[in-house]
Image (cartoon, grey):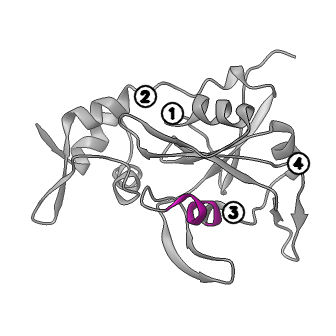
Amino acid sequence: MLLTTGQAAQELGCAITTFRRLVHAGLLPGLSRRGVRVMVPLNVVQALGQRRHAPLDRLDAQEVAVLRVDAAKQVQEPDRNWIGFAASLDADTLHQSLHGWWRCDPASIAAGGVLPVTLSGYVVAVLTGLDQWERDERGRHGFPRARLVGYVTDLVEPVKHLTATDPVDRQLADLLLGTRLVSHSGGTIAYVSTNSAD
């Protein structure tokens, strides 16, 4: 059975624009077209609905920051050609596309030790190496030593690519990739309680 993107969004209880970000990022297998409509297999939608929530209580921090991104789009910047997430980007390009300057509390990001990257509420990549930061003239912060330690290319399975060599980073990426992580923020960075005990 095939659903339209509107029906798929309704089934998942999200906005159609939220669901379309997953389509545009290339994270859903088995899509087809009927004219201008994108059709989504029911089993894909059901798999998304059954994805487990990120086990943040297993992290060694009271709070973690979350980097909320959109589907990748091309840009003309000195250090990158893409911004955002797409399953089709290779690891190096993806790392650059997620490496930005944000209005944030850098000490809180560093204290969390990990920066899950979400698209439409699913963890699609994980960054670590956040212990050092810089501030630009606009008051935004960047993390020059941030490492891409893993990403997904399919949310249904999910298909994970662990790029870290450090076993702790690999474990973090494996723990979080493909899970659901809802966050609320008016900006790119959100902060989420892990509900961890002191």
**Label 3: which secondary element:** loop
Name the residue that disc number 4 marks. Answer: 131
Residue 196, percent from left and from top: 77, 19
Name the residue that disc number 2 marks. Answer: 51
Q: Earlier in the sequence, mark 2 or mark 1?
A: 2
Residue 184, percent from left and from top: 62, 43
Q: Is residue 170 above or below residue 66?
A: above
Residue 110 vs residue 18, the one in the foreground? 110
The kind of residue tagged 2 is Arg
Residue 176 vs residue 91, the one in the foreground? 91
Mark closer to the observer (4, 1): 4
Tell me the tag on residue 169. none
Instruction: Using the numbered discs, state the Cα–Cα distance from disc 1 to disc 3 in whole angstroms.
Output: 22 Å
Q: Which residues are magenta?
A: 90-96
The kind of residue tagged 3 is His
Q: Is residue 172 above or below residue 36?
A: above
Instruction: Using the numbered discs, state the Cα–Cα distance from disc 4 to disc 3 in whole angstroms.
Output: 15 Å
Name the residue that disc number 1 marks. Answer: 180
Instruction: Using the numbered discs, state the Cα–Cα distance from disc 4 to disc 1 in whole angstroms.
Output: 25 Å
Q: Earlier in the sequence, mark 4 or mark 3?
A: 3
- Residue at x 9% of width, y 65% of height: 35
Residue 161 vs residue 3, the one in the foreground? 161
Instruction: Using the numbered discs, state the Cα–Cα distance from disc 2 to disc 1 in whole angstroms.
Output: 6 Å
Instruction: Determine contact: label 4, label 3, CB under 8 Å.
Output: no
Q: Quadrant of the C terminus?
A: top right
Count of residue discs: 4
Name the residue that disc number 3 marks. Answer: 99
- Residue at x 48% of width, y 71% of height: 73
Q: Residues within 10 Å of mark 2 (few under 14, many from 20)?
A: some
Residue 99, percent from left and from top: 69, 63
Q: Is residue 93 magenta?
A: yes
